[in-house]
Structures are given as structure tokens and as C-alpha cells.
Image (cartoon, grey):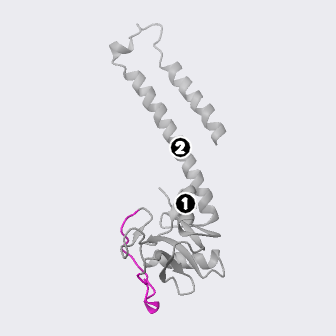
Amino acid sequence: MARLALPIFLLLSFSLLCCSRPSRTRKAISPRQAGGGEDEDVKSQVERLWQEVNALKEMQALQTVCLRGIKTHKKCYLTIEEPKHYHDANEDCIAQGGTLATPRDLLENNELRDYAKRSAPGSRDVWIGVADIVKEGQYVDVNSLPVSYFNWDRSKKQPTGTKRESCVALSVVAQGKWYDDVCRSLKKYICEIVIP
């Protein structure tokens, strides 16, 4: 795709420049006289073409991630089985074009739980994108936006409320309930990539 993009771009640019010259039968009008409209039109067409090429590259990358994971609710989820600390896990998700998965409602939470069971059999829990690192008890997602949906494991008195346990994991064995844990713990994790 990248090999084809540059030649296509050059061909289109050349054809636009070639075809936008005045004919010999008409008197040429300088850009100053015409108000520079044609130059601006060509520039905007070239800019639009570059935007389309970049959008296609982004969609191709998303499709690659989605093929390895699952696609649901305009999101792709991908389980990473190499256990990492919470922050390293989120950095890895960012490098793949997303963030740690953050369930926004019970349906998404259950889908993440079921996907974790299928994609990482034997896993007890996975990191999700919720934490109260900045202010104890104030849970936000990885973009620092307040979280409005919670699925705490109340039978285990979660969240515990200690400053040491600031990162949230989804428990596969406790039917998708959440608990807070030490961010330096090693866990598998699920990345979430939003599909435009």
C-alpha cells in the first residue's frame, strides 16, 4: 500500500498541474489576476488526497489488530498474554494505537470477561483502564476522564481503599468483578482500539 501511495500521489499531482495550465487559444491569466484560486484548489486537492491515504493506512492497521482480537461496539479488543505492570501494559496498548480496555457498561464488561476467558485460558484476571492513582477513591480511565460504570466485587469489600492498590483488574474467575491491586503487579491485559 505504501509503495503504491507515492506513485499514485505523484501521478495525480502531475495530472492536476498538467491539466490546469491555460490553453494556447486563451490568454493566460496570472495567479494574481485570478486571485490564486487555481493554486489553492490544487493545494486543497493534494491535501485531501494525503488525508485519504493516511486514513487508509490507519484503517489497515486497525483491521490487522481487529483480526487478531475481537470487534464489537465500534471497538477492537486484543488480549496480550505477556504479563506486565499496569503502566507498561497501557504503554504497550498506546503503541498499538489504543489504550487499556475500559468497560463503559455491564454489556461491555461481560464481553471483556468472556473474551478474556477465550483468549487467555487459565487467566485469573486482566488489567483494565481504570485507576485512582492521582486522588484516592476518584477513579478515572487512562485518559483521565471520570468513570461512571463500576463492577466492584463487593463480597471481597472492593475497592479496598488503600493507597498502595490504585490500579483496577477485571477478575475472570469472579465473573468479571473488579478489584483494585498494586500497579506493579504483573498481569495480562486487554487493549481497546476505537474504530472511527
Query: Position of 84 compared to 139: left or right?
Result: right
The crowding category of the residue bearing disc 1, from other C-alpha atoms within 10 Å (few below 14, some 14 to 19, many at least 20), is some
For label 1, the SS is helix
- List x then y, in percent, for residue 76: 54, 64
Q: Is residue 5 above or below residue 43?
A: below
Q: Relative to residue 31, is residue 126 depicted above or below?
A: below
Estimate how packed mark 2 is, as few (under 14), some (14 to 19) or many (20 or more) residues with alpha carbons within 10 Å: some
Q: Is residue 112 a member of the stretch shown in magenta?
A: no
**In the image shown, does 182 or 62 lie closer to the viewer?**
182
Up the image or down, 150 lies above or below 129; here it is below
How far from the left and from the top, in percent, is residue 14?
A: 56, 23
Amino acid at pointer 2: Asn
Q: How far, Cα to Cα, is label 2 from label 1?
A: 23 Å
Dot 2 and dot 1 residues touching (CB under 8 Å): no
Secondary structure mostly seen in magenta is: loop
Q: Quadrant of the N terminus?
A: top right
| Residue drawn at point x = 57 percent, y = 64 percent | 88
Look at 55% across and 61% down and name the residue there.
Answer: 93
- Which numbered disc covers residue 91? 1
**Disc number lying in front (2 or 1):** 1
Compared with 76, 103 (above or below) is below
Residue 81 location in percent, x, y? Answer: 65, 71
Residue closer to the observer: 182 or 187: 182
Please report the residue visible at 33 percent of the width from the left and 13 percent of the height from the top.
Answer: 33
Span of residues in magenta: 144-161
